Amino acid sequence: MMPNRFFLGLGTGEYLNEHILGDPCPRIETRQEMLSEAIHIIRELWNGKEYSYDGTYFTVRDARIYTLPEKLHPIYMAASGADSAETAAEIADGLISISSGDEIVKAFKKRGGSEKPCFGSVKVCWAYSMDKAKQVVKQWWPISAVSGPLHADLPTPKHFEDVVEAMGEPKIPEDSIIGPNPTPYLKAIQSLQENGYDHIYIHQIGPNQEGFLKFFESELCLF
């Protein structure tokens, strides 16, 4: 299973993915408790022994994983708030966050995650021109202007489409990192590092992934 190349990333979920089971989507506090219980079960099963469990949210009967990798993959937990970051510090092997500030990392490290990896994320759209980058964002990521809480509460792709349509002309946030100039990209990466992130995931919007990778290699890896 190619050890040291993968980790298991887990989070509390969002309505888009959860509502398909037909159950109500619990409040974030409940989802945090469910995630903690689930991670506990995963770690017990990773011992490779038969395991049973009666919990608040999950029940396991005589379960066992018979084939395990030589080295277990670390579990990294996603967090968008300080409470989730503190929980991640206690039960996970690392942190994942799309928040650019330092609040999440500080909460994570304060609760005991100071020696654990912190993965930050930045969305970008490289293109040969600024105008082309704006066109790509409007076509492929028009929800960039939709607020965070709304992202978590919409149940279907059609609802996202309706929100975008209601906004009219898709708006591109002023702090968007787009276009061919490497300076904003480098500033965003540096900002994440200064805020405590030691691993950075760059999300290139749109289909021109090859062009972005060449730009990354020639313009960003030199610094």
Image: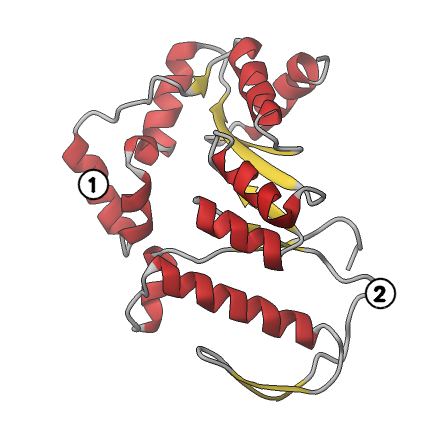
On the image, the x and y values in percent for residue 148 come to: 33, 40
Circle 1 sits on which residue?
163
Secondary structure under the numbered disc 2 in the rendered image: loop
In front here: 130 or 32? 32
Circle 2 sits on which residue?
70
Q: Please state if 9 lies on the left or on the right of 114 as rendered.
A: left
The earlier-in-sequence mark between 2 and 1 is: 2
Residues packed near mark 1 inside 10 Å, few (<14), some (14 to 19) or many (20 plus): some
Secondary structure under the numbered disc 1 in the rendered image: helix
Q: Quadrant of the C terminus?
A: top right
How far is the residue under mark 2 from the one under mark 1? 47 Å
> Which residue is most to the bottom?
62
Q: Quadrant of the N terminus?
A: bottom right
Q: Is residue 215 above or below residue 204?
A: above
Q: For residue 143, what is the image quadrant?
A: top left
- Looking at the rendered structure, the kind of residue marked 2 is Glu
On the image, the x and y values in percent for residue 4 come to: 79, 50
